[in-house]
Amino acid sequence: MREAFNIESGKHYVAGHRGMVGAAIVRALQQAGARQIVHKTSNELDLRDSSAVHRFFEAERPDYVFLAAAKVGGIWANSTYPAEFIYDNLQIQNNVIEASRRFGVRKLLFLGSSCIYPKLAPQPLKEEYLMTGPLEPTNEPYAMAKLAGMSMVRAYRQQYGSDFISVLPCNLYGPGDNYHPKQSHVMAALLRKFSEAVRQGSAEVEVWGTGSPLREFMHCDDLASACLFLMEHYSSEEPVNIGTGTEISIRDLAGKIAEATGFQGKLVFNPEYPDGTPRKVMDSTRLMEMGWRAKVDLGLGIRETLGGLSSADF
Ligand code: GFB
């Protein structure tokens, strides 16, 4: 019989705590009463270094692990640094998952992404559609690494009885995002572009691609809430989609952000940049049937994220 997930008394290790997702998970754990949260910066602990990771786990012996550390980025970053995306992510997840098994971690949550579904899988995406067709070329190495991580989670459950689970979030945004002008995801990139355009009085903002692709966005605090919910209530080898079920075109998203920032100028769509996957809205029935729902409305989430931006972000 597996022991219940005990937030208060358990020792939680959040790998990647300084990233947008990791920081949101730390906030959620603190708000839920967690008293022992351990984390290390990438300078303190390089998760690609197997012996360093094993030394850390031997010393800290966490009960629960949230594997939110990864090399992530938007469509341009994935297309530009494919070797780093596959190497770093394979190294990180191999080391953390194996060390978690070796040092008796009670439960581990592995984060995949909706971008690892086949490019043209039927929509909305159901978990069983994974691995049923060719991947989106712009982030195939990243997707292969994440698919390998999910396979590892299943294999460790089967061979060692490890209580490890995998989740698949949709596109995310919120405080602490990466606002790098080229390497960021679309939400962060547009929040930055429109904010700077208003500040500088620019007449136009460049939006990459045609604007026609559809994306599903969730606030990182909702994702963190879903992760704690699944750590408490879910224990199976099947991955779980974490989405809102609502999609928006890049064009309409740009319009929403222009309105939220008060930008009055022109949107210029640049088709020299790739559109990527045309759609990737997920079917999150498996999660919703367990009783969890996303709470943060997209318009409100965009305004709150804008309001929280500071010069430290850009
Ligand atoms: O978030 P994003 O970069 O990646 O979104 P994906 C890319 C979509 O937004 C493309 C358009 O259709 C872009 O043409 N876009 C418009 C922009 N303006 C911009 C901009 O200024 N910056 C960016 N980045 N995009 C990612 C995967 O796919 O999804 C990652 O590559 C990750 O691995 C992430 O899984 C969740 O949503 O296409």
Image (cartoon, helix red, strand yellow):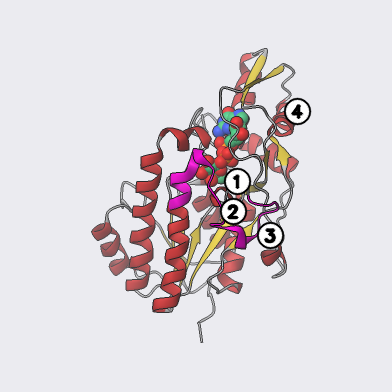
- Which comes before the other along the chain, label 4 or label 1? 1
Q: Amino acid at mark 3?
A: Ser
Q: Amino acid at mark 2?
A: Pro
The secondary element bearing badge 2 is classed as strand
Q: Please state if 114 lies on the left or on the right of 37 as rendered.
A: right
Mark 2 CB within 8 Å of ligand 1: yes
| Residue 259 badge | 4
Q: Alpha carbon of mark 3 to alpha carbon of mark 4: how far?
A: 29 Å
Q: Amino acid at mark 4?
A: Glu
Q: Quadrant of residue 97?
A: bottom left
The secondary element bearing badge 1 is classed as strand
Mark 1 CB within 8 Å of ligand 1: yes
- Which comes before the other along the chain, label 1 or label 3? 1
Residue 33 lies, in percent from the top left, at 56, 66
Q: Alpha carbon of mark 2 to alpha carbon of mark 1: how far?
A: 8 Å
Q: Alpha carbon of mark 2 to alpha carbon of mark 3: how far?
A: 10 Å
Residue contact at pointers 2 and 3, CB within 8 angstroms? no
Residue 13 lies, in percent from the top left, at 42, 62
Ligand 1 lies in which image quarter? top right
Q: Please state if 108 lies on the left or on the right of 123 as rendered.
A: left
- Which comes before the other along the chain, label 2 or label 3? 2
Q: Which residue is mark 2?
A: 169
Query: Is 40 rendered above or below residue 292?
Result: above
Query: Is 20 rendered above or below residue 265?
Result: below
- Which comes before the other along the chain, label 3 or label 4? 4
Q: Alpha carbon of mark 4 to alpha carbon of mark 1: how far?
A: 20 Å
Residue contact at pointers 2 and 1, CB within 8 angstroms? yes
Which stretch is magenta? 121-144
Q: Quadrant of residue 155?
A: bottom left
